[in-house]
Amino acid sequence: MSELKLPTTTRRQILKYFASAPLLPMAVGGASASMLVGCSGDDDSAPAVPTASFKAAVFLPMAAPTLAKPAEMATTLVNSSLEVTLSDDSKLGYVLSYKPFFITGDLVADGKGGTILAGGYVDINNKPIIDKSVVGKERQFFSDSPDGTSLLSVPDAKVDGVKGKPVFAVVQFEYTTRNQAGGDTYGQLPSPIAVLTLDQDQTTGQLSLVKYHNVDTSKAHGLWITCGASLSPWGTHLSSEEYEPDAFTARTDAQFQAYSTNVFGSPSAANPYHYGHLPEVTVNPDGTGSIKKHYCLGRISHELIQVMPDNRTALMGDDNTNSGLFIFVADKEKDLSAGTLYVAKLGTGFSVDTAAAGAAISWINLGHATSAEIENLANTLKPTDIMEVLTKDPSDTSFTKIFTNGVANWIKVKPGMEKAAAFLETHRYAYLKGGSMGFTKMEGTTVNIKDKTAYSALQNCQDSMVKDGKGWNAASGIALDKPLKAGVVMAHTLTGGQVDLGGAGINSEWVPVRTKALLSGEDISADTLGNTANPNKIGNPDNLKFSEKLRTLFIGEDSSQHVNNFVWAYNVDTKALVRLMSMPAGAEATGLGVVDDLNGWTYITTNFQHAGDWGSIHKIVQPTLDPLIRANYKDRFGSAVGYLTASPQAIKLTK
């Protein structure tokens, strides 16, 4: 590797080095020196430097933390860097760091002269939901699980208190793990979504929180377990609702009853068909936001969607056992309120071996709908109006055996209810129509536009993906010989001119036609820290985002096999996999986002969830790390929302 050099020039001359470069708020050089601090002053009479333009950038790795420095395992750790190569082959190095906007549970500015609880829960009337589990310690619930985050700008934005330029982050909060008494609260509270107004310093590129605004979700019936998110090409935040409640059992399900009580004040008020859809948030110039829920993209375990550059085609992650690969093709650009839903049918050759050629993908048309008509069906139909679902074999050939979430069902669609089944009972109907409903934990998805390749994360490859596993069926085209619990990232080749299996054309140039394994984890026997997946490879990939400028696929883990979860950078040209960041032990990496150009700067957002959520792999480290994590993160109730930047001073790499 070439030596990293810090040129002795003026600040203005340094900036001239980076014509056409992406802009990243970073520091440079050694552990304590920034590039600007290392310069010889701001004397414009210094000799002009030769013009050298941006050529390439690669990330340089950090080691995983160990118990030799337990404090590093109990916090967010960034010891990675970025190496920029210029057209004259000289190199500059930049040290990365992590900057949180807040820790959930903090009181932050509400933009009205007061404060608001970051990650705080409210009911359908926007009243605080109170944790009363410990007498005398009543307080508003707040989330320990921030997730999907979109960083964006809005034309003509103006927010009081911003000194530089106003930019915005939309942040959703998936759930909270427990109440103060330690009781399980997963999925029992309505997911909040907030718009953060951020002050973008035009000298350094650094971002600081000015205003926190809770989006009113009442018109969307409240939100259910909002997981990953993406930024639409037209600048809106595309949210998610995963693990859609089973409408056939929801009325007697304790989790759903608790959710309904917390949202509406009654255990029977919530309608399960209102959840499992796609919410979309629009940010207003004043830092407020509005939300609408799209009901026509299928009611599945929405991890997130990725809209392609045509502004119409959406590839969807489906985070479940017996999940599928779905696409939605909208009727109009930049409008997800009507379109056609498809489920994938795999050909032969599916493999998690990165050396294998992979499998062809064809598509089954499940139907066309508008959001308004499906919402109306959700409002008016009961599950038994749509189909019959049995859990024991009726010995009746009019029923079809399927698997949903690893459990056998025998189903029969009621006459005339095909559209309702397609869009409200999507998992069951897609299986019935022949879709390859054999994936497990299909999480994040993203797109590499230049190479016309999409990526999907399979957090675990087990159960319905393994021959004779729970929920497995040969017709899915997925038949692994053994599980790969550490997961895999799949790459999908995209093209146009496709027809569905019914012979009708698919009106998109961005249809996946082949899938193959790109990166895989490796299951191992427990190492000295307790890792059961190789810590130098991805483990249980979840969040995925791609940077066109950096030619890099970013990967965030949701790993029960890595003692600390990591954020990785994979260069699709050099094939180098680099560890960028480590989360506190027991925490999941979430909120991953990449914006190549936001007023000239490049940003990588990332959050974490549930620090100190101890499992069997943590028995070695827990006694040492538990008190540290409790001290760092509000007794394990707090989690960070923030972004990767540089320390101590940011540099603008621009013309």
Image (cartoon, grey):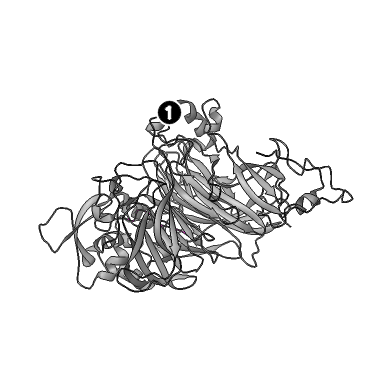
The residue under the point 37% across, 45% down is 460
Q: Is residue 486 above or below residue 152?
A: above
What secondary structure prevails in the magenta region?
Answer: loop
All told, the count of numbered labels is 1
| Residue located beneath label 1 in the image | 527
Q: Tell which residue pokes out farthest to the left in this image.
A: 395
Q: Nearer the viewer, residue 409 or 137?
A: 409
Quarter of the image containing the N terminus?
Answer: top right
Q: Which of 453 and 337 is in front in this view?
A: 453
Is residue 462 at all visible to an observer of this figure?
yes
Whole-percent x, y for residue 572 in the image:
53, 50
Mark 1 burial class by Cα count in 10 Å: few <14, some 14-19, many 20+: few
**Element on which disc 1 rests:** loop
Question: Where does the image place residue 605, in percent across and percent down from the top left?
Answer: 56, 50
Q: Is residue 476 magenta?
A: no
**Image quarter (top left, top right, bottom left or bottom right) of the C terminus:** bottom right
Residue 650 relative to residue 586: left or right: right
Q: In this view, does 95 lie to the left or right of 449?
A: right
Residue drawn at x 49%, y 72% is 333
Outermost residue, right direction?
45
Q: Is residue 189 visible?
A: no
Describe residue 253's horizontal placement relative to residue 52 as left or right: left
The x, y position of residue 279, in whole percent, is 44, 62
Nearer to the camera, 264 or 390: 390
Task: Give the magenta range.
Answer: 238-244
> In the rendering, at what x and y percent does residue 222 appear?
41, 59
**Label 1 is placed on what type of residue?**
Asp
